[in-house]
């Protein structure tokens, strides 16, 4: 049987410099950079690879990164104060902050500068 070490996922962005600024200065995530790619530190020794595709990048229309927090509304308000716009989806009941409550864990969606969908979700 194959023995996997530490699996990780990845997604592309159109502009690695914009991604570095957003993930570090807005979301507050640490990262390392190697060969023009980022390894986001998402906690507990886990990483996510962010790689540049330039003009060939197509934003993910599904959630590529879920960021668990204790207080979704508080996190949403803090990030909104840093310029993050939270998505509103037809057919989903979301409060004034864009948080969907009562249908699974509290969750709110936003996009990174490359248009990839991400979420703040109750841990």
Image (tube, rainbow, N blue to C red):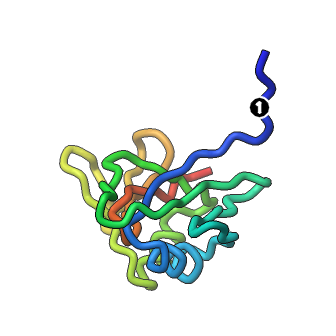
Return the residue found at the far left: 90
Q: Position of residue 87 (x, y in %)?
A: 30, 62
The residue that appears at 33% across and 73% down in the rendered structure is: 85
Q: Is residue 98 left or right of residue 47?
A: left
Q: Position of residue 26 (x, y in %)?
A: 52, 79
Badge 1: how crowded within 10 Å, few (<14), some, or many (20+)?
few
Camera-side residue of 85 and 104: 85
**Callout 1 secondary element:** loop
Camera-side residue of 101 and 27: 27
The residue that appears at 44% across and 57% down in the rendered structure is: 12
The quadrant of the image that shows the N terminus is top right
Q: Is residue 56 left or right of residue 18?
A: left
- How many discs mark residues in the rendered view? 1
Return the residue found at the far front: 35
The residue to which callout 1 is attached is 4
Question: Image quadrant of residue 29?
Answer: bottom right
Q: Position of residue 122 (x, y in %)?
A: 56, 52
Q: Position of residue 68 (x, y in %)?
A: 60, 55
Question: Image quadrant of residue 38?
Answer: bottom right
The residue that appears at 54% across and 60% down in the rendered structure is: 50
Question: Image quadrant of residue 41?
Answer: bottom right
Q: Is residue 67 left or right of residue 14?
A: right
The residue that appears at 67% across and 59% down in the rendered structure is: 42
């Amino acid at each position: 049987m194959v023995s996997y070490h530490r699996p990780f996922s990845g997604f592309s962005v159109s502009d690695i410099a914009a991604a570095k600024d957003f993930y570090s200065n807005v979301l507050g995530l640490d990262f390392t950079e190697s060969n023009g790619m980022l390894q986001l530190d998402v906690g507990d020794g886990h990483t996510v690879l962010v790689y540049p595709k330039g003009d060939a990048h197509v934003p993910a229309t599904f959630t590529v990164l879920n960021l668990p927090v204790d207080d979704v509304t508080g996190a949403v308000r803090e990030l909104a104060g840093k310029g993050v716009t939270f998505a509103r989806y037809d057919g989903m009941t979301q409060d004034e902050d864009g948080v969907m409550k009562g249908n699974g864990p509290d969750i709110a969606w936003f996009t990174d500068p490359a248009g990839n969908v991400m979420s703040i979700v109750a841990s």
